[in-house]
Image (cartoon, helix red, strand yellow):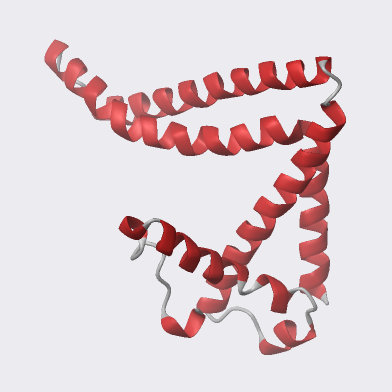
Amino acid sequence: MLLDIIILIALALAGYKGFKRGLVVSALSFLAIFIGLLAAFKISSTVIEYVENEKEPAQWYHIAIFFLILIGVILLIHLIARAVRGTLRLVQLGLLDSIGGAIFQVALNLFVLSFFILYVNMLGFLPEELKSTSITYRYLSPLAPNTLSFLGKIFPILKDVFELPKKYQ
């Protein structure tokens, strides 16, 4: 029961946050972090090579350049998201955007909570009594393993990244 209350509070907060931000901003914020990390990994090495040619960089340059690129990409995508959201408001699609944002945030948080439950369960931190008295546990616990298995089939190159020990599938 305690687990159910925690999950329901987390999902209610996620729904509220998604409703306030809207689908466009919520989805692009999620993508911004993902794209920002990829760009930071890809571009930072090129920038570091350029800086190394100019002068001997300090060790912290590597970290600073990585985070500057990450933050720059995230801010750029957020600006785009805000502009798109403003356009949706002008054409009277704001309510649909807000409802879509709530659904997106709840779904994303269900996925994250499922991963957290999977991880905590793998470490043996979830008591059997807590699992057996929870209504949401039986629905939430298979979400992460099933999603990882599905993503491993779609993206074979990532299959071993998404593989879990058999006893958790």
Number of callouts in the render? 0
Q: Which residue lies furthest to the top in this view?
A: 54
Q: In which quarter of the image is residue 116?
A: bottom right
- Is residue 98 at least partly visible in the picture? yes
Along the viewing direction, whichever of 157 and 133 lies nearer the viewer:
157
Classify the position of the N terminus by image quarter: bottom right
Is residue 93 or residue 118 the one in the foreground? 93
Please state the horizontal and vertical placement of residue 30, each as a whole percent of the image: 58, 39
- Does any portion of residue 58 appear in the rendered image? no
Percent coordinates x, y for residue 92 in the rendering:
86, 21
User: In the image shown, does 31 or 50 lie closer to the viewer?
Assistant: 31
Q: In which quarter of the image is residue 114?
A: bottom right
* Residue shown at the point (43%, 83%) measured from the top left: 166
- Is 19 above or below relative to 107? above
Location of residue 152 with respect to 167 vertically, above or below: above
Query: Residue 117, percent across and down?
Result: 61, 70
- In the image, 115: left or right of 44? right
Q: Where is residue 96 in the image (x, y as percent from the top left)?
A: 83, 34
Q: Is residue 31 left or right of residue 8?
A: left
- Identified at 63% across, 59% down, the residue is 111
| Image quarter of residue 42 | top left
Q: Is residue 90 left or right of residue 81?
A: right
The residue sitting at 83% across, 26% down in the picture is: 93
